Image (cartoon, grey):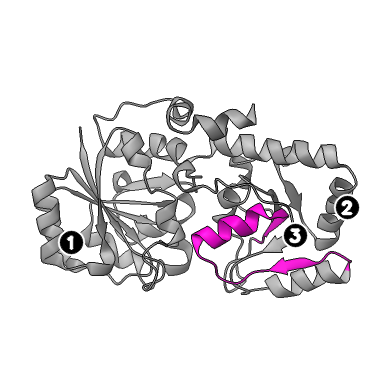
């Protein structure tokens, strides 16, 4: 059995139970795919301690999940012990300021296809780049059932044109429940209490459209109400979400489903099935691992899901 050390960093330094979204998407997944995984608490990081952990555990791989962390040039010394891999989910925002500077100090980088040319331009070998997509993680899903007390909700920051679009919803008669930045547990419950959850696609400075992690956070308990974004069509068909190009279009579709409960329930179920059947973190790692580990044997992600998450998966049938 291959051994892996994964570095974890809390999203909030004072909340040891809440990790950044980038980490939560992958937590517990490699364990289910046949690896012996040790999680290293980055909040208590010292290089000597990390190196000792890797040596004592006899790790084959070290995966560092980057979350706004400065470059560690000392990771270069770990290459003699194991393969060093950087996983980054915020590649669009922080490539130039942070992520490209990791290239000399890691063996491989896992991130989004859209930034591949940036990494190759900055010196990464093509065989060291591995494409990832957002993946729904059943190990950290919301397991409770909640009444739908909100019609539409939005969580997270108000950068770009988000607030002006939310105000447009209100002008057209659709109240939007606004949440700010939430812990992962708070986010899951907020989504579960809402019929529709908004996902805007503009980046923080409103210069490009990006696929957001919300596309795999929302559909397990709510209908994804989303603007279009690059690669969104690889996650969902149009009848598995509400796709809109204008607020007016979104409001029209919401009114239709609010007046047709059976159609709403069908839409919610279709989104849930799409999430479980083709968009889990098991699906994603099953594509990534053969390019990293020559001994990895490709599995059927649905069989893993049935083995470990049958209670929730069987509810979809």
Residue 245's spot in the image, x, y percent?
77, 56
Residue at the location (54% across, 55% down)? 213
Residue 1 visible? The answer is yes
Residue at the location (63% across, 42% down)? 233
Q: Is residue 4 above or below residue 250?
A: above
Residue 255: which numbered mark, if any?
2
**Lateral position of residue 258 relative to residue 17, left or right:** right
Residue 250 or residue 258, whichever sits in front: 258
The residue that label 3 is drawn on is 150
Residue 95 or residue 218, whichever sits in front: 218
The residue that label 1 is drawn on is 75
Q: Which residues are magenta?
A: 172-200
Q: Bin the neighbour count of mark 3 within 10 Å (Cα to Cα): few under 14, some 14-19, many 20 and up.
A: some
Q: Nearer the viewer, mark 1 or mark 3?
A: 3
Q: Nearer the viewer, mark 2 or mark 1?
A: 2
Inter-mark Cα distance, 2 to 1:
54 Å
Residue 232's spot in the image, x, y percent?
62, 47
């Amino acid at each position: 059995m291959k051994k892996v050390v994964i570095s974890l960093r809390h999203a909030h330094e004072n909340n040891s139970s809440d990790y950044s979204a980038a980490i939560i998407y992958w937590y517990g997944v490699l364990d289910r795919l046949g690896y012996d995984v040790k999680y290293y608490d980055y909040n208590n990081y010292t290089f000597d301690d990390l190196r000792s952990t890797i040596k004592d555990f006899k790790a084959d791989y070290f995966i560092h999940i980057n979350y706004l962390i400065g470059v560690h040039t000392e990771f270069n010394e770990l290459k003699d012990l194991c393969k060093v891999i950087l996983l980054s989910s915020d590649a669009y925002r922080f490539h130039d300021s942070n992520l490209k500077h990791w290239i000399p100090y890691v063996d491989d980088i896992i991130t989004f296809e859209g930034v591949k040319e940036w990494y190759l331009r900055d010196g990464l070998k093509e065989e060291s780049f591995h494409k990832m997509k957002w993946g729904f993680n059943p190990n950290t899903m919301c397991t409770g059932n909640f009444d739908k007390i909100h019609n539409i909700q939005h969580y997270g920051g108000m950068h770009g044109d988000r607030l002006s679009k939310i105000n447009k919803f209100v002008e057209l008669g659709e109240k939007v429940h606004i949440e700010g930045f939430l812990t992962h547990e708070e986010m899951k419950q907020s989504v579960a209490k809402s019929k529709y959850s908004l996902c805007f696609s503009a980046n923080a400075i409103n210069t490009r459209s990006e696929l957001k992690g919300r596309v795999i956070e929302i559909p397990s308990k709510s209908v994804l109400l989303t603007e279009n974004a690059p690669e969104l069509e690889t996650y969902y068909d149009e009848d598995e979400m509400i796709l809109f190009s204008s607020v007016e279009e979104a409001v029209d579709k919401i009114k239709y489903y609010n007046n047709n409960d059976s159609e709403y329930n069908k839409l919610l179920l279709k989104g849930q099935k799409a999430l479980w059947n083709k968009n889990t973190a098991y699906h994603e790692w099953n594509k990534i691992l053969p390019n990293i580990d020559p001994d990895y044997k490709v599995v059927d992600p649905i069989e893993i899901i049935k083995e470990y998450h049958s209670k929730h998966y069987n509810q979809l049938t």
